[in-house]
Image (cartoon, rainbow, N blue to C red):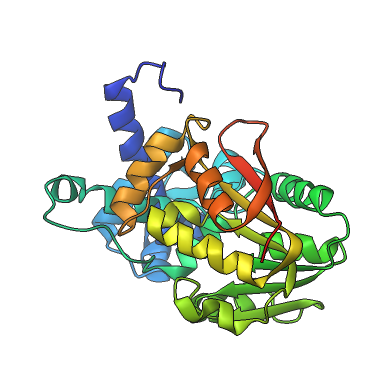
Amino acid sequence: MSSSEEIDLERAIEDADKIVLLGSALKTGIFSALAGEKDIAELVSELNANERALFIVLEALCSLGFVNREKNRYIITDKARFFFVERGEDYLGDYLPHALNKLKAWLDLPLIIKGEKPGKEAPTDVPSFMKAMSSRPDKMVEFVVDECIRRKKDAKTALDLGGGPGKYARTFVKKGMEVVLYDMPETIDYVSMEFGLKDIRNLTLKKGDFTEHEFADDFQDGSFDIVFMGNICHIYSEEENIKLIGRAGKILKKGGLLAIEDFVRGRSPEAEMFAVNMLASTIAGGTWTEEQYREWLKVAGFSKIEVLDFADGDKQLITAILESK
């Protein structure tokens, strides 16, 4: 929604109610259990659920068109099947649990605004967060990787920094590159199995904390042709981003490419609202302007800085070439 659109507050409240209902049904296994017809007794046993609560939720889902009831038996509708069961282009099942966690964080905004409570330091629900990140459209990931390679045609090595579920890392590998995916130990432990990353040829999984000053010591100077930082900078403060870009420059080869995907304030219509999400979900995160990114990159020795708007305009890809070491 652009800033020029009026908000129907009553409709927004109703939609929030529906999101919580749908997310709760998904997380408790109702939709997957209703792949075939079942009655209340069967569902109570299968889901270990409260009968009264289950009845009320099922009837509400019927009223919204996500579940059908024939006499006393329930089954998921085709519409809901596409959203929550079948993993096609319309599948939302991986993102919705993360959306619920986000809403929970936003409920602390009154305390955060008053300075009585900070945002969260890191996602506490790694599976939900990683599944949400994996819902990034494949076409968009392909577009970003192609733009990186177009700017660094001779690239043979890449680092996917904080790459989580590895969608970008996989795509760089598919393009013929040797890739390292670097993320927190608990994230690597989860994605290596859940997303089948541990057995991909030319993909190395490495555990570490890239906010620590020792991060660059995990690699030799000039190890990579491309360092990709997707959806990272909004998590951290301006000071932390300056340090992070400096560390990335240390492990890039001279002439190497640094690529940053994020919401750029002043170019993305989503940036201001996403900054509120970071206020609720991080200690010092936010969204940053093109001028800030350009200054950070220049200080770290980068030039040929470009900012590319995605087709939908929501996000930007910032690229820069390392000129000095």
Residue 254 vs 316, above or below: the answer is below
Q: Is residue 311 visible?
A: yes
Q: Is residue 165 visible?
A: no
Nearer to us in this view, 46 or 108? 108
For image coordinates 42% across by 56% down, the residue present is: 235
Residue 225 vs 105, above or below: the answer is below
Quarter occupied by residue 300? bottom right
For image coordinates 64% across by 53% down, the residue present is: 302
Q: Residue 110 appears at what percent x and percent y?
A: 15, 45
Q: Residue 44 appears at what percent x and percent y?
A: 36, 65
Q: Residue 316 appears at what percent x and percent y?
A: 60, 40
Looking at the figure, which quarter contains the C terminus? bottom right
Residue 44 vs 78, above or below: the answer is below
Q: Is residue 142 left or right of residue 54?
A: right
For image coordinates 75% across by 52% down, the residue present is: 145
Nearer to us in this view, 79 or 68? 79
Quarter occupied by residue 18? top left
For image coordinates 26% across by 57% down, the residue present is: 119
Extreme residue in the front direction: 324
Instruction: Count how many numbered circles sit on residues in the image.
Output: 0
Q: Residue 193 appears at what percent x and percent y?
A: 62, 79
Q: Is residue 230 left or right of residue 186?
A: right
Q: Is residue 283 left or right of residue 117?
A: right
